[in-house]
Amino acid sequence: MSEKSKPKTRIPMPEQPAGERINNFEEVALGYSKEAALAEASRCLNCKEPKCVEGCPVNVDIPGFIKLLTEEAFKGAIEKIKATNALPAICGRVCPQETQCEARCVLGKKGEPVAIGRLERFCADYERGKGGNVSEKAIISEVASEKKVAIVGSGPAGLTAAADLAKLGYKVTIFESLHKAGGVLSYGIPEFRLPKAIVQEEVEYIKSLGVELKPNYIIGRVKTLDALAEEFDAVFLGTGAGLPRFMGIEGENLNGVYSANEFLTRVNLMKAYDPEYDTLIKMGKKVVVVGGGNVAMDSARAALRLGAEEVDVVYRRGEEEMPARREEIKHAKEEGISFRLLSNPIRVLGDEQFNVKGVECIKMELGAPDESGRRSPVPIEGSEFSLEAEVVIIAIGTSPNPLIFKGSKGLSQHKKGTVIAEAESGATSKPGVFAGGDVVTGAATVISAMEAGKKAAKAIDEYLKKN
Amino acid sequence: MSYKILKKEEVAPAVHRMEINAPDVAKAAKAGQFIILRIDEKGERIPLTIADFNPETGTVAVIFQEMGKTTKQLATLSAGGFIEDFVGPLGTPSDVRKVGTVILVGGGVGVAPIYPQAKAYTAAGNKVISIIGARNKELLLLEKEMREVCSELYIATDDGSKGHHGFVTDIMKEILDSDEKVDRVVIVGPPIMMKVGAGVAAPYDVEILVSLNTIMVDGTGMCGGCRVTVDGETKFTCVDGPEFDARKVDFVELMNRLSMYREEETAAKEKYEHKCKCGLH
């Protein structure tokens, strides 16, 4: 079929209506039916030189799996994806496809690109529905190695590295500081965007490859990196960027001010929304969320679902500059979140009981571009205004947790607290120690962490073959 | 994961000591550190100071008072039972070295974390003078154990049922006023006791440390719920502490922050107690 004869628009993804979904934590996007998936898959031109694959950080054979999908070879399709991507049910949901694979799709020039993410999700969910993950076992290398690899952190980087190394036949142990595996997939991204059952299924799949998981185990406290490097033949650090940033403004320690990390951890990992759980959370009628990324959107939408009546997102730049995915901004708007753009908090206001009662903000205008190329916001004198709020959530970014550096001789660190590692291999300044994901780049995306985990696994394999 | 409870005893009314099998924690633990536990899948994560640890047997002891829902539920568990999650050691260990003479002040369950410190300071060659206190003699913890690891031990009770009738800080002041050359004071107990103690010791030429117990979730610096202002700067109790220079701690903020969930905590406790009475638990 030629490009011209393909429908210009993609098959829409069914969603929970906004009015309904703000009352529950269930998934917003409901996934394609088989019919919808087949119809959408048939839009793919199966290009000879597919640009979409270049846009994928883990190089999934996109036309390959879509072709199998059109033939209704669902098992083959998911196997094709899993050949390079160990976490398709997750990537199909949280990857920013619109800036990666889908951004390169030829159909996107004159209409909407193929909904690659939705098709990936369909394949993964189809397999899950069939009690999937069994087909994978065949791929594990039969040449078992006696060499042991330690993975620090069970987020997307660590899980991907673990899966690839286990498939290559290495003995892999993952050390996780929290009681549950998944890192940001478990504590950060809410249930309504990424159901935790899916994360746990993917973790179980990685365990089925022979990977040992040690929860409640903090490298830097229980054992140092030096000791770990001694004990294992290679180490991969995928510890993420877990340290919350605060604004350093007056009133930030008042009761009711949360870091997004704490708020989301209480909600997602500790299930504060479920009355069966003991987790405590402060909620108010009015909530202010500070920041413009996905974490800010997640916090705002979670607050709404916990019963907040009015949620304001305060962001110092304009909507164009918001780092959040367009889809998340759209979902937030549909749900009734208000956006106070070009505004910045200057003070958190409290009452005599030390509780938050509002936020004083100042309006901003965009000045000259900064290092990141985005125009930096400058306060407009005399434009102060106040917002009422009983809860304030600070979602202005995170940096790597410095605990990993305790007892890590020779591990070089960037000024910003990130681990210095080679881009292609993840090799650090410490022999046998590799790193990747947010701990190297600072807070970024799930898929870029997976890419780093993948590259590091390859480099670790090469390193272990030589040493 | 689950961690076996090896021993449990009620050491004072509604105060329990539990020994838990946690070899990784026991091997790495040092005086001044704490753990976080979660009883079961639906439980909250609560921090408890390490009351004792033995790297050889792989055991860690905690002492807790029944206060809220979680500690009440924890008290219903017995030897042979299991705790779902038990993670540690957390926090920066106490800076234990030979400083000369150290006064250790412990109030209420604050005596529990003082005990490993007393052992460690004594082992490091210090003269250790400990002052332990409680509301009454029944609630006084670890008297015998403390006596074995300190050079001197003083006792104070609020009602005068044992030792000095009054506060532990009264005895501390007496020692600071005496000819004894004191190099360091460590105070662990309820925040109000630490605040008052820090105020009493402040005018003396002596280092004063307090060990804070704040609200926290992960214990690794990830949530920031444990923030405390020290010397005008926000610090995280879980990684920067729990020990801080007492003269620089904003105790008013600390106490306010500890009351953040008071209403929710009371409601949770009442709901739990009601369930227990109805035999639902």
Image: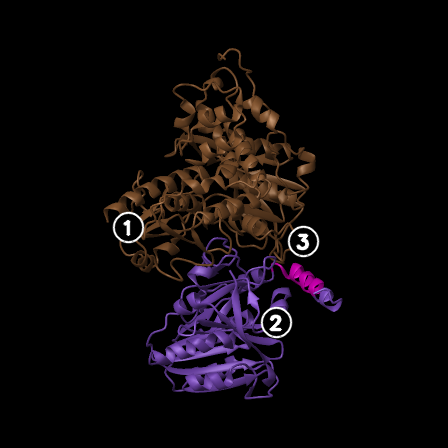
Chain colours: A brown, B purple
Do discs 3 and 2 belong to a common subunit? no
User: Which range is magenta?
Assistant: B260-272
Say what amino acid the circle numbered 2 marks: Ala
Separation (CA) of disc 2 from disc 1: 46 Å
Give the number of the mark in front: 2 or 1: 1
Of A292 and B31, the residue lying toward us: B31
Measured from the top left, where is residue B130 in percent x and y? 45, 82
Separation (CA) of disc 3 from disc 2: 22 Å
Label whose residue precedes the other's in the sequence (1 or 3): 3
Q: Which mark is residue A432?
A: 1
Residue at mark 3: A275
Give the number of the mark in front: 1 or 3: 1
Measured from the top left, where is residue B97 in percent x and y? 33, 74
> Is residue A322 visible to us here?
no
Magenta stretch prevailing secondary structure: helix
Q: Which mark is residue B94?
A: none
* Residue B268 lies in the magenta stretch: yes
Separation (CA) of disc 1 from disc 3: 46 Å
Within 10 angstroms of label 3, few (less than 14), some, or many (20 or more) residues? few
Residue at mark 2: B75
Badge 1 element: loop
